[in-house]
Amino acid sequence: MNTDMVSLSGQPVRFNDRSATARFGLIALATDMTSERDLYRQLPEANVAIHVTRVAFENPTTPDNLRLMTPRLSEAAGLLAPLSPLKAICYSCTAASVVIGDAAVTDAIQLSVGPVPVVTPAGAARRAFSALGARRIAVLTPYTIATSQPMAEYFLGHGLEITSFDCLGLEDDRDMARVSDATIIDAALAVDRPDAEALFLSCTGLPAINVIAEIERRAGKPVVTSNQASAWAMARLAGFDDHRPAAFGRLFDCALPAETVGEAA
């Protein structure tokens, strides 16, 4: 092509307002098949962009393998730094945020991006229970017993009572992403107890947001899931206080309570 044919346009370039789009960062596991879709479905479609980076992870989903991601978080978060300003960054792994710790996750991410709010699914779930006024919870995870045990200790350590705790015994988060709606509904209703004030369905890989409304209808109490709690916290941190998608449960009727000093969202 003859470059003499190319000329610089005389039209002035105008830019859209930076604040017109609420931008979020998402750090997903290399094996995550669910988080991106779930978050986009729950956040305001016209006003949001989710910028995704991935962190190396290899199954099986064990506490030791989950901890291996700790030194990788800063590097993964650094890939999001050029996209600043971000409303929040979500580290989309519930079990890892439990075994690594919310504060350690936040420190590793903010090391690369500065003081951006960090959302972990476990921390968002705790704030969800606070917003719902629930202290006694029934918990369902897709993990093994060994991977579920730290989660029980996490919630107990934060002052919650666990009325019952079941797990499905899966080791591979790619299998967790394929669990059927019927299985999730049946297992959630089976773990419920009359004295439980809310149900928690753990794992960002578990496709649980599809069945929140049905479980709430049948159980007669709030349901919190990892991706739902994360999306709710992200929406509220971005100022979407009136965003209340009915399909994803009672939680979206709630405001985000203040976090405890020093703790992640």
Image: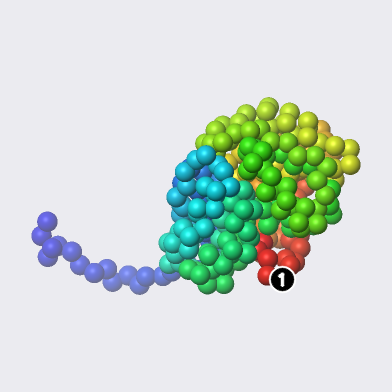
Q: Can residue 131 be seen in this view?
A: no
For the residue pair 210 and 103, the one nearer the viewer reads as: 103
User: How far across and how far down the image is residue 173, in percent?
Assistant: 54, 39
- Residue sitting at 67 percent across and 49 percent down? 150
User: How far across and how far down the image is residue 72, in percent?
Assistant: 46, 58
Q: Can residue 69 be seen in this view?
A: yes
Q: In this view, does 9 lie to the left or right of 222?
A: left
- Residue 43, compared with residue 196, is above or below; it is below
- Residue sitting at 12 percent across and 56 percent down? 1
Q: Name the residue under label 1.
A: 261
Mark 1 burial class by Cα count in 10 Å: few <14, some 14-19, many 20+? few
- Residue sitting at 56 percent across and 36 percent down? 171
Amino acid type indicated by mark 1 = Val
Secondary structure at badge 1 equals loop
- Residue sitting at 52 percent across and 58 percent down? 70
For the residue pair 159 and 135, the one nearer the viewer reads as: 159
